[in-house]
Every structure is written in structure tokens, then in C-alpha cells.
Image (cartoon, helix red, strand yellow):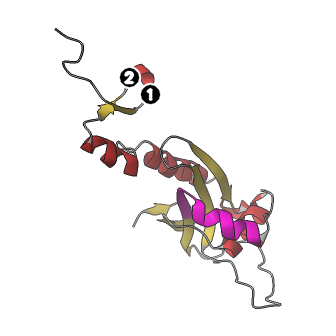
Amino acid sequence: MVALITKYNVYTLSHSIPSTATYRHLCRSGGLSDKSPSACAIGLPRSVFCVQILAASCMPGTDVTSTEFPEPDSIEEQPDPRVVGMGRIIGDGTLFLQIVDIVLLPAHQHLGLGKFIMWELMLWIEAPCPRVAGRLYERFGFGFTEASGSRGMAYTVRGKGKE
């Protein structure tokens, strides 16, 4: 478990997809546009990778969320009050990746947590092995390459065309 310690709070990191209620709460509170519950139910599970920042503890006199949660007026799922920020990667998992939804609750902004979310996402993107496809290509003789400044896999034909 990774722990982040700031002047006022201790945070932990989770590589998990937020619930729909948590995602919507973060977006609304953090200044991003809200999405419908049905869109979240379809889109969030299709995330390639997610990072959530959870407030593990707070110093006396500080508030974990600093935002009011709506009173439950139905059986609707409630946001996780520990989650104070998140970021996601969407795409096909190997060729095309896009970083989206970097958001922090206002009380937890300007503490370096956004940079930490980005570092975690970039570590995942920069991992040395392309995801599942890499193992398949290796079985057929492909090897890793960084030709032309782009990381990928290549196959070298040996002996073909040489007399």
C-alpha cells in the first residue's frame, strides 16, 4: 500500500474503478461535467486503468471531504466518503490510451495529489511490456523495439532474400 503524507492529511492509493456514485460526486464537486448513472454504468467498467486517492486520516480540525453528501432519498448508492480524487485511462489498452477525469475535491487540491495521480497513470502507461498482445507477439518471434522514438514490437525476417 502506498501512503502519501501532506501537511494535514495521510492518503492511500487504490488502483480500482470508482463506483458510479463516487465518480459522479467527484466530478460534480471537482468541477467536471456530470454524467448520467447509466453512462457511468457502461463507461466506468471499460476503463483501462484507474487511480483513486483515499483520505486515510486527517489532522484534528480538518475535514476529509469538505463537501456535503446528498441525503439518501432513495436506495441509490452513496459515494465513498474516503475517496478525494481520481484519474482514469481509457482506450484499447495498448495502442491508444487517453488520460481522463483527473479530479480532486476542492479541499484536497494544491497539495500535489494531482501530480501523484498523473505519475501513477504514467507509470502504468510506460510499463515496459505492452499489455496482453505483447505475450502473444513474443510467441511468434517478435521482440521489443524503440525504433523511431516509439516503443513497440518488431519482427525481423532472417535470411529471406539473401542468396
Residue type at the position of mark 2: Ala
**Would you place residue 129 above or below residue 5 in this image?**
above
**Would you place residue 117 above or below residue 108 in this image?**
above
Magenta run includes residue 56: no
Q: Camera-side residue: 143 or 61?
A: 143
Could you tell me how many numbered marks the image carries?
Answer: 2
Magenta run includes residue 42: yes
Residue 150's disc is 1
Left or right of residue 104: residue 36: right
Q: Point out residue 105 in the picture as x, y percentages from the top left corner.
A: 70, 63
Looking at the rendered structure, the secondary structure element under dot 2 is: helix
Q: Point out residue 26 in the picture as x, y percentages from the top left corner.
A: 71, 65
Residue 147's disc is 2
Position of the N terminus, as image quadrant, is bottom left
**Discs 1, 2 touching: Cβ within 8 Å:** yes
Q: State the residue at coordinates (60%, 45%).
A: 98
Q: Tell me if I can see residue 109 in this picture.
A: no
Residue 64's disc is none
Left or right of residue 140: residue 89: right
